[in-house]
Amino acid sequence: MEPMLPPHAPTDPVWASVVAVIYFGSFIATGIAARAAFAWLMRRHGVDLEDVHALAGPNRPSRKVFLLGAWRTED
């Protein structure tokens, strides 16, 4: 029985692309699944992100955070 993929030389750019898609695609798929799961849980329990921030109280200081390559200030 033949293998599913023919053997490639380590320098083959197509093989490198396949490996990169499998490697990075798994991380992206895991992140999308986790985000969807958390969104579903928050909708199910009727909680919004503002509600979570409100739990910290009125004395919560604003802070600068780094998110997805950009700095932003949380109120």
Image: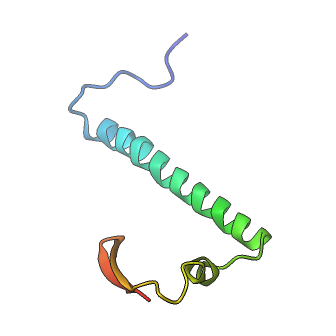
Q: Quadrant of the C terminus?
A: bottom left
For this orientation, the residue located farthest to the front is 59
39 to 7, vertically: above or below: below
Q: Quadrant of the N terminus?
A: top right
18 to 51, vertically: above or below: above
For this orientation, the residue located farthest to the top is 1
Q: Which residue shows up at 47% across the image and 87% down it?
A: 59
19 to 46, vertically: above or below: above
Corner quadrant of residue 73: bottom left
- Which sits in the foreground, 43 or 25? 43
- What x and y, as percent, mark residue 17? 33, 44
For this orientation, the residue located farthest to the left is 11
Q: Which residue shows up at 59% across the image and 56% down it?
A: 34
Corner quadrant of residue 45: bottom right
Q: Which residue shows up at 48% across the image and 46% down it?
A: 26
- What x and y, as percent, mark residue 40? 72, 66
Corner quadrant of residue 39: bottom right
- What x and y, as percent, mark residue 10? 24, 28
Q: Which residue shows up at 52% across the image and 89% down it?
A: 58
State left or right for residue 67 relative to residue 59.
Answer: left
Display coloring = rainbow
| Number of marks in the rendered image | 0
- What x and y, as percent, mark residue 57? 55, 84
